[in-house]
Image: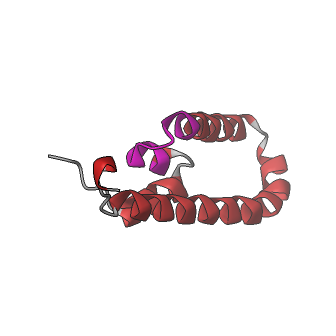
């Protein structure tokens, strides 16, 4: 039985952890793993920055991060919808 992927789950995963929606979709796995690794390393680096610097820079970084998150979520949603479409076998084309 083939696993039915849900577009909304792919979008939510990609919104919160960049790349996780791609891994869930199973199509661009290497790209997804690299994005997940980048997301984790960015989160780890943000924990090492002094609090004063975080307060000054957080507003600047929040908007681009939100836009990128929305873009990745939308892309994973579209990819998952495309993967769910029924396909004709090659011999029928």
Q: Is residue 63 above or below residue 55?
A: below
Determine which quarter of the picture holds residue 34: top right
Q: Nearer the viewer, residue 76 or 2?
A: 2
Residue drawn at the location 83% of the way across and 49% of the way down: 52
Measuring 73% from the left and 62% from the top, which residue is drawn there? 62
Percent position (x, y) of residue 2? 20, 47
Magenta span covers which residues?
A: 21-33
Q: Quadrant of the C terminus?
A: bottom left
- Viewer-side residue, 61 vs 11: 11
Q: Measured from the top left, where is residue 88 in percent x and y?
A: 30, 57
| The stretch drawn in magenta includes residue 25 | yes
Classified by dominant secondary structure, the portion drawn in magenta counts as helix
Tell me: 64 left or right of 24.
Answer: right
Residue plotted at (34% across, 64% down): 85
Q: Is residue 32 above or below residue 14?
A: above
Q: Which residue: 72% across, 34% down?
A: 48
In the image, is 2 to the left or to the right of 84? left
- For this orientation, the residue located farthest to the left is 1
Q: Is residue 8 visible?
A: yes
19 with respect to 54 (left or right): left
User: Which of the pair 38/49 is nearer the observer?
Assistant: 38
Residue 50 vertical position relative to residue 63 in the rendered view, above or below? above
Q: Position of residue 25 (x, y in %)?
A: 40, 49
| Image coordinates for residue 43, horizontal then vertical, percent | 63, 41
């Amino acid at each position: 039985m083939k696993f039915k992927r849900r577009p909304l789950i792919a979008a939510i995963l990609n919104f919160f952890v960049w790349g996780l929606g791609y891994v869930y979709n199973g199509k661009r796995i290497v790209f997804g793993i690299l994005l997940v690794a980048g997301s984790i390393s960015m989160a780890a680096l943000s924990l090492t920055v002094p609090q004063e610097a975080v307060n000054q820079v957080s507003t600047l970084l929040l908007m681009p991060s939100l836009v990128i998150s929305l873009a990745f979520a939308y892309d994973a949603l579209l990819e998952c919808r495309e993967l769910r479409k029924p396909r004709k076998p090659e011999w029928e084309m």
